[in-house]
Image (cartoon, coloured by chain):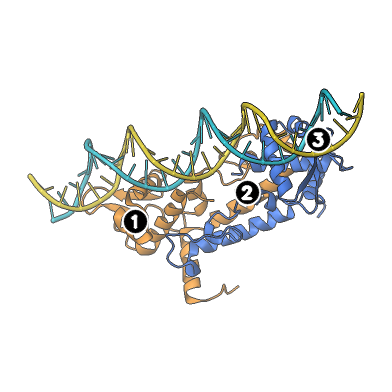
Chain colours: A blue, B orange, C yellow, D cyan
DNA sequence: ATAATTCCTATTAAATCAATAGGATTTATA
DNA sequence: TATAAATCCTATTGATTTAATAGGAATTAT
């Protein structure tokens, strides 16, 4: 399961991508109210997103947060990695967070590893394609009741 | 990431499927040594697997554990669910462990949910096909250096 | 009877998670 | 230039989960 941090981060990012066409700063408390997130908790989350380069902020009165990158350049893979670490289900198949399974005898011939390598590959692939733009497209498609045209 | 319990359970099951063709009971301590797992910890894990119907045991002297179902009827999806709960990354897309995202406004039109529903579907699909037999096949293929024939 | 094994319950130490608290810093604007 | 309103930063906390450990009860082959 995703952590609450990761989930709230995604919700906040999608909110900003949806509501903030002009890129004027939006306050933490506005996002917190709309998305039903504790303001103080969200504060820390948005700061992390800023330090990761996805958001930028304006300080002081009339300050707030806005997207630093375009909505099709921010994807769910990088957000979940930022808060929850590896996407892989086993450390030995992670790329950015690789670690050896201490109990493993031979990584190269491990059938379990082989399974989870495939799972990781597919998952990362799907989450990388899930950009903020993509998510908003899905919202619109679901809202209007359309199906994917194919 | 999988919990250690889930990982150890998979290792133990694959061990039993590989080493235990005659289905005579194998002792906990034998598996623990081979797979580098704490004996006491493995004890609890194997008991859970027994209660879930995947293993059976013989008590007393010369007792031990053996597979209750055939190796192609035990898959990684059910093992990880047993120890780690839902495979889904969001509660709202889980099937067996469904729960509402409290902060969600409308599940039916949520683009985030839509993404994670796809991820879950693919993951469950892959993990269901990853049976003990399949894993041992992979081991053999990897050991002999063959590629999948296609 | 004995030894060897699984079965069962309880406890624990450490880590992680989800949040809260409080104030420092920055900035628009009256 | 004072004030209000916002982000920024550090520290703390309570609850939960994880990964084990401990100790003994029950069972069974020899």
Element type at mark 1: helix
Instruction: Kindly report which numbered mark, 3 or 2, lies closer to the viewer in this rendering.
Output: 3
Q: Judge the density around disc 2: few (<14), some (14-19), many (≥20) Cα neighbours within 10 Å.
A: many
Closer to us: A98 or B108: A98
Label located before the other in sequence (2 or 1): 1
Picture disc at residue A97: none
Is the residue under label 3 in contact with that under label 1 (CB below 8 Å)? no
Instruction: Kindly report which numbered mark, 1 or 3, lies closer to the viewer in this rendering.
Output: 3
- Disc 3: host chain: A
Q: Is residue B35 above or below residue C18?
A: below
- Residue that appears at 82% across and 36% down: A63
Q: Judge the density around disc 1: few (<14), some (14-19), many (≥20) Cα neighbours within 10 Å.
A: some
Instruction: Kindly report which numbered mark, 2 or 1, lies closer to the viewer in this rendering.
Output: 1
Q: Judge the density around disc 3: few (<14), some (14-19), many (≥20) Cα neighbours within 10 Å.
A: few
Picture disc at residue B120: 2
Closer to us: A10 or B110: A10
- Which residue is denoted by mark 3 in the rendering? A60
- Which residue is denoted by mark 1 in the rendering? B32
Is any atom of residue A12 visible in this view?
yes
């Amino acid at each position: 399961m995703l952590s609450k941090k990761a989930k709230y981060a995604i919700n906040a990012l999608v909110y900003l991508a949806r509501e903030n066409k002009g890129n004027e700063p939006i306050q933490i408390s506005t996002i917190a109210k709309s998305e039903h997130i504790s303001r103080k908790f969200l504060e820390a989350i948005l700061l992390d997103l800023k330090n990761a380069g996805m958001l930028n902020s304006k300080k002081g009165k009339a300050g707030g947060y806005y997207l630093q990158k375009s909505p099709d350049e921010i994807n769910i893979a990088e957000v979940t990695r930022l808060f929850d670490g590896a996407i892989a289900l086993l450390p030995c198949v992670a790329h950015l967070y690789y670690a050896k399974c201490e109990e493993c005898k031979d990584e190269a011939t491990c059938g379990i590893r082989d399974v989870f390598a495939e799972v990781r590959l597919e998952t990362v692939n799907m989450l990388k394609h899930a950009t903020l733009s993509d998510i908003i497209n899905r919202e619109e498609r679901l809202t209007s009741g359309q199906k994917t045209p194919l």
